[in-house]
Image (cartoon, helix red, strand yellow):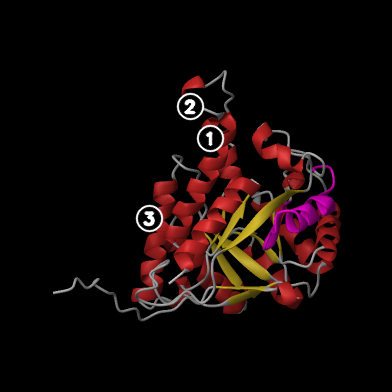
Amino acid sequence: MAFQIPQITYSGKIKEVTLGKGPKAVTIGGENSYPFHLFEGEMAHPPRIAMEVYDAPPEDWPETALEPFSDVVHDPVAWAKKCIESYGADLVALQLVSTDPNGLNRPSEEAAETAKKVASSIDVPLIVWGSANADKDGDVLRKVAEVCDGMNLIIGPVVEGNYKQVGAGAIGYRHTAIASSPIDINLAKQLNILLGNLGIPDGQILVDPTTGGLGYGIEYTYSVMERDRMAALTQQDERLQFPIICNMAKEVWKTKEAKASAEEAPALGDPRRRGILMEAMTAVVLLLAGADILVMRHPEAIKMVREMISDLMAK
């Protein structure tokens, strides 16, 4: 008797969200089974990778991560174009790190103009990510939404402390909101409900569960994402049936294992290869947990992950 793989019956489906405009717009979501369980259901759209761009030259990146972009780190527009033209980025993720009140604290108007310049210079969807300071992001992302009216950006992180302010901008100026909660499925659902009650259409919401890098809390992130997908697909929980985005690169490359030199940690092997593999392995774990978009950094790690996605999507 031939072995038959036990199959789960799914009653739910992840909502589809279209990001960006024009011929290079990206649609994500649409899954009606667990990640890559193509023997049970379908993944209408493969997971996508966004490449990071910073609005100020990064000061704490290890040389391995900085090397591919060393010629463009002073110009976010040139950086974004390199990600697309040289590395084939599906999306660009502009990290507005310079707006952090504990850092450069650049004004919201300046950040909004930077976002508009980048958005106007590229033909792939643009993610605009704030500094994760709820108060400052509320002002920054509202201004970004306004000056980029109709460009269908993806803006976040939207948190409970600023969801009315940022959410109103997403509705009024037609952008997608990233609902960000601190690795807790109940808080994630609560924020999704609040955004829905505010009036943001389901087709304009992504979920950011927050994540750690490999060995730095990723197992907790995995379990929360897993529970999210179980509730969405087998329990018909409509307020969890949204695509997931993971802003993971900064979490990987700030770890001591990714940053330590060969002299500082000789037992850990080649520091260049180590950082790239840590990013790739983190990405794989998040994909298997249900991520629809990964924000990544190093081109070699991205290449490996793309190959894995292609292999897993092949029936």
Q: Write down the quadrant of residue 101 in the picture.
A: top right
Residues under labels 1 and 3: Cα distance? 25 Å
Q: Nearer the viewer, residue 2 or 179?
A: 2
Q: Nearer the viewer, residue 111 or 218?
A: 218
167 with respect to 308 (left or right): right
Mark 1 or 3, closer to the camera = 1
Asked if marks 1 and 2 touch (Cβ < 8 Å), the reply is yes
> Relative to residue 16, is residue 122 depicted above or below?
above
What mark, if any, has residue 268 been given in the picture? 2
Tell me which numbered mark, 3 or 2, is placed earlier along the sequence: 3
Quarter of the N terminus within the rendering: bottom left
269 with respect to 261 (left or right): left
Q: Secondary structure at mark 3?
A: helix
Tell me which numbered mark, 1 or 2, is placed earlier along the sequence: 2
What mark, if any, has residue 223 been given in the picture? 3
Q: Residue at x 74, y 66 (%)?
A: 124
**Residue 29 image position (x, y, % from top left):** 53, 73
Tell me which numbered mark, 1 or 3, is placed earlier along the sequence: 3
Q: Residue at x 76, y 56 (%)?
A: 140
**Residue 121 image position (x, y, % from top left):** 85, 62
Q: Residue at x 86, y 59 (%)?
A: 117
Find the magenta span and give its range.
Answer: 73-95
Q: Write down the quadrant of residue 154 in the picture.
A: bottom right
- What residue is disc 1 on? 274
102 with respect to 252 (left or right): right
Asked if marks 3 and 2 touch (Cβ < 8 Å), the reply is no
